[in-house]
Amino acid sequence: MSAESSESLSDAVSRIPPGSSVATGLALEHAIPFAAGHELARQGVDDLTLIGPISDLLFDQLIGCGAVSRVRAAWVGNVSAGTGYRFREAVENDEIDVENHSNFSIALALRAGALGVPFLPTRSLLGSDVFAESDCFEAGTDPFGGEEVAYVPAIEPDWAIVHAQRASPEGDVHLWGNTGIVGPAVGAAENVLVTAEEVVDPETIHSDPSRTAITREQVSAVVECPWGAHPSPVAGHYNRDNEYYLRYHGATDTQAAFDEWADEWVYGVDDREEYMRGVDADLSITEPTVAAEVRYGQ
Amino acid sequence: MASEAYAPRELMVSAAAAEIEDGDTAFVGMRLPLIAFQVAVSTHAPDSMAVYESGVVRDGPADGFIHTMCDLPNLNRAVSTTGMLDIMSRLQRGDVDVGFLGGAEVDRYGNLNTTRVRAGDREIRLPGSGGACDIACMAGRTVLLMPHESRRFVEEVNYVTSPGHADDGSGRENHPAPGGGPDALVTSKATFGFADGELFLRSVHPGVDREAMLADFPWEVRTAPEVGEGPVTTTPEPTAEELDLIRTFDPDGFWT
């Protein structure tokens, strides 16, 4: 499916039905699609299964908003402060189901999905309770060498949500900086929603094909969404808003406190533009690095 | 050489940095190791490299404070910014020399728990593994860092997030994980090594009462002379150069 050209974030997110499995936060602490996540919460899309590696805050927020039934992830919390209180409380109250992964196992599960194979073997996990206490993994033997390995089953999310620097309306995407497991997740997902700092002319994409990380046939929706990853950083656009993470940590230790936070930052704003009016931090890039020119042609 | 006053966590960073040897590829995660690698590569280990599971590869310190491995100064002028499978592939192939781990609980074999702990009859959920389980399983050796608190030292961890050594004295020989396993534990009061897969006291930080510090463990901790590893020493204080670097890399003392 190719993207239906650039559309509004609310229209794009409205195509994600309740009960979907959604992989997001895939570049680890970088370029987390907070704007799209908040729109899911505003639209009341619930019963979600969230899939990701470390989820720096976004999973905690969606859990606090009551949008989540299940989490398949390696780490859920707040990298600046440690605990994510909404995740912790939801687990302790048995309100969500958690499948514990390591970062590598979630990466391999999505890679298996992208490769179209049922599982991939790894030398990780063995001897841990991530493996021993899980219904997800199986012990296996290398049929060639006889070594004990762990089998990681494929995960094929209904949706992957990715934030990028720029995309064409057709759905060809440039992204740079570290990519975490964006590639495997996009390959494994049935649908991909891209939010981009800029929607650009296709010529811009064609000028630098080595930078194209996602192509149109993988993408279901492209949305221009400046500041769509705040408070996480986006290379070339803005720095991490660390104070925001710390304030969130201090303001969400009870559900009632979280609800107040969400009333201000999620439900109390119509869109990202309004959200950003509440952000009072200078996150600008003061020392931009310009890459050496790349020449090619014919 | 030794220095003016320093914070306990500055000593931990210095001790952690000392665990990176020149030429090492180090797997760096969250918190103190972010600073420790930058100190090591700026001092005794100029040819070390850092890999981060986000996909970042660096051969030098960041020019600016980093809260996380993905903060823009850590991406800026990196060797490469790639993806996790690239980094984890190096780890799985055995190309990562040393990895850093933390934990809410550790036992004598270096098993670490960052998934769930008990507090009375309540079970508290923690964030989980992240890349820790992978590093613990597959790095050439691991260095464990944690505050020195008696509740963290347990006979048996509540959940093995990151596996340590086998409990039969064989270290990693009879353990299914392929890496070398825990090589050192650095706390805010002492440093420890591992012999035959079990913890032993290596050095005590300056000013720390050794017996009181050891009383924080629920088992009789072996000491370096008992395992043929020389005397128990005093952990070197951070040098003036190291302190200067730590305060450059963490100017507001956010991590230290």
Image (spheres, coloured by chain):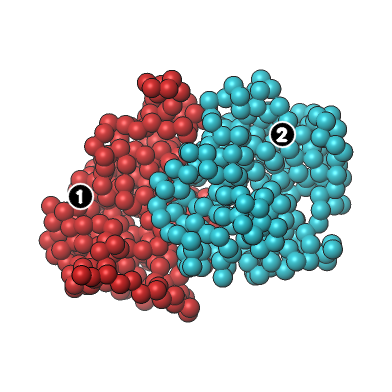
Chain colours: A red, B cyan
Vertical relation: A281 (above or below) B148: below
Discs 1, 2: same chain: no
Write the residue at 65% across / 34% down.
Answer: B110
Q: Nearer the viewer, mark 1 or mark 2?
A: 2
Chain bearing tag 2 is: B
Point out residue A243 in the picture as x, y percentages from the top left corner.
51, 67
User: Residue A27 is drawn in which quadrant?
Assistant: bottom left
Whether residue B221 is visible, yes or no, is: yes
Q: Residues within 10 Å of mark 1 (few under 14, many from 20)?
A: many
Query: In the image, which disc is placed on residue B194?
Result: 2
Write the residue at 85% across / 44% down.
Answer: B233
Write the residue at 30% across / 72% down.
Answer: A295
User: Residue B82 is drawn in which quadrant?
Assistant: bottom left
Compared across the picture, whether B38 is left or right of A49 comes to: right
Nearest the eye: A59 or A94: A59
Point out residue A74 in the picture as x, y percentages from the top left corner.
44, 42
Query: In the image, which disc is placed on residue A191?
Result: 1
Q: Residues within 10 Å of mark 2 (few under 14, many from 20)?
A: many
